Image (cartoon, helix red, strand yellow):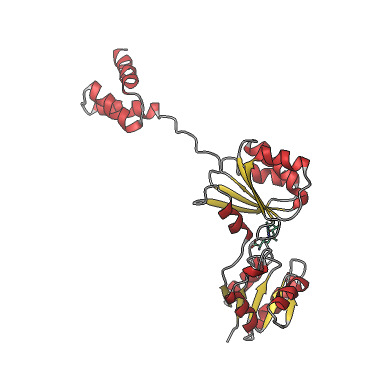
Amino acid sequence: MAGKLYLVPTPIGNLGDISRRAAQTLEAADFIAAEDTRVTVKLLNHLELHKPMVAYHRHNCETAGPAILRRLEAGESCALVTDAGTPAISDPGEDMVALCAAAGVEVEAIPGPCALVVALSASGLPTARFTFEGFLPLNKKNRRARLEALADEERTMVFYEAPHKLRTTLDDLAEVFGPDRPLAVCRELTKLHEEVLRLTVGQAQARYAAQEPRGEFVLVAAGRPPRAEAPDGDGALARAQALRREGMALKAAAAQAAEEFGVKKRQLYNQMLEREET
Ligand code: SAM
């Protein structure tokens, strides 16, 4: 019988955020696949656990992934952890899950810390609908294209960003979204120097022009405000004319079409009158 892959979220800064279930899963698994075994060993020491570990990261996943899969198919259970947060969210865990899914090996995801959720929930921006954009592409042209594609996005947008790219990203956001777009800059979440700045893109640019960005960042940008819908004048006129053809009186047809299309009754009436007189 095939074993199971457990996705075990780990703290994004505060060791107290490891859940009891996550710790129990690490303890019960036959082995742990870790993005960086040096990082994970600190967590295991904190939990007083000693477990066999294998490395699984973006530079070895092509060979390590199939090797882990073979062990799972032979009946072992594996707890997959990454350096911080929820495996498979902007980290190589994604490929391991796909491999298991394709091979019919069961995957169980344990809920837990995830930087995007912590940032979004603290952002003060609308959370009912959002889009997670992960890291923007490194290449300038591709980054720009990705942002341009979001120019009309009305949902709140969440980005992961490295400190050395923060200034460039803020400049790009200012160009595409405008400097007045509300933004939450979430830094060092759950850590000693945690900070959530709720400002505009322009204010964030000014702040980080004066101060070197340090630490880990999540940017949460407000979506574009919905455009006020222009009243559909042509639609109203066509509808009123159709009502006239059905035999309705001019005034009543104008009133009904104006109501249906949210346009001014008097204006529509005059427009129809003009056409009927010519
Ligand atoms: N899988 C992880 C998760 O669930 O959040 C994310 C992994 S991704 C490789 C790392 C990025 O997450 C960082 O570059 C940063 O954007 C964000 N991040 C992780 N920890 C953070 C923290 N404590 N504060 C702010 N951002 C953090």
Q: Residue at x 68, y 36 (%)?
A: 175
Q: Nearer the viewer, residue 236 or 215?
A: 215
Res. 10 in view: no
Q: Which of the 4 quarters of the picture holds residue 44?
A: bottom right
Q: Nearer the viewer, residue 267 or 194?
A: 194
Q: Residue at x 78, y 50 (%)?
A: 164
Vertical arrangement, residue 182 with respect to residue 14, above or below: above
Residue 59 left/right relative to 72? right
Q: Quadrant of the N terminus?
A: bottom right
| The image quadrant in which ligand 1 is located | bottom right
Residue 237, given in percent of the width and then of the height, sits at 34, 25
Vertical arrangement, residue 140 with respect to residue 257, above or below: below
Q: Which of the 4 quarters of the picture holds residue 88?
A: bottom right
Q: How many marks?
A: 0
Q: Nearer the viewer, residue 272 or 131?
A: 131
Residue 122, given in percent of the width and then of the height, sits at 58, 53
Res. 133 in view: yes
Q: Residue at x 49, y 35 (%)?
A: 227
Q: Quadrant of the C terminus?
A: top left
Q: Residue furthest front?
A: 192
Residue 163 left/right relative to 258? right
Residue 91 left/right relative to 132? right
Residue 245, given in percent of the width and then of the height, sits at 25, 26
